[in-house]
Image (spheres, rainbow, N blue to C red):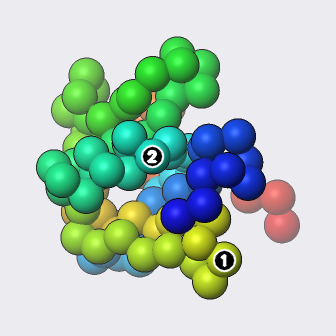
Amino acid sequence: MDFNKSGGLIPVITQDAKTKVVLMQAYANREAVELTLKTKKATYWSRSRNEIWVKGETSGNTQKIISVSTDCDFDSLLYIVEQIGPACHTGEYSCFYNKLL
């Protein structure tokens, strides 16, 4: 992974393994990716709190990692997860619920 291209953070797209719905987009630093691979719990970097964030740690809406893939440029990731509860902090199943077209 090339963490140098974007100031140490890379985008992560998270998709539900069962429904194939895109759940969210977040960012990860090297430590978050290493923790994700080690623990099999979706782990991100919170830009607002400036800290590691394990999805569901406080809400209970967890993401168990099924697979992790990189894009062809090695500068973004795709987490395929088993989603428990809603993925969005608003309570929606997916963060992508606002239709523009």
Q: Residue furthest right?
A: 101
Mark toward the start of the polypeptide (2 vs 1): 2
44 displayed left or right of 59: right
* Residue drawn at x 38%, y 41% as measured from the top left: 31
SS assignment at label 2: helix
Q: Residue furthest bottom?
A: 72
Question: Are the two marked residues, 2 and 1, in contact with CB atoms closer than 8 angstroms?
Answer: no
Does 76 appear above or below 54? below
Q: Which residue is mark 1?
A: 73
Give x and y (percent) for residue 66.
23, 70
Number of marks in the image? Answer: 2
SS assignment at label 1: loop
Closer-to-camera residue (31/45): 31
20 displayed left or right of 60: right
Which quarter of the rendering shows the C terminus? bottom right
Q: What label sits on residue 30 in the rendered view?
A: 2
Does 27 appear above or below 89? below
Image quadrant in which you'd find residue 14: bottom left
Give x and y (percent) for residue 36.
28, 51
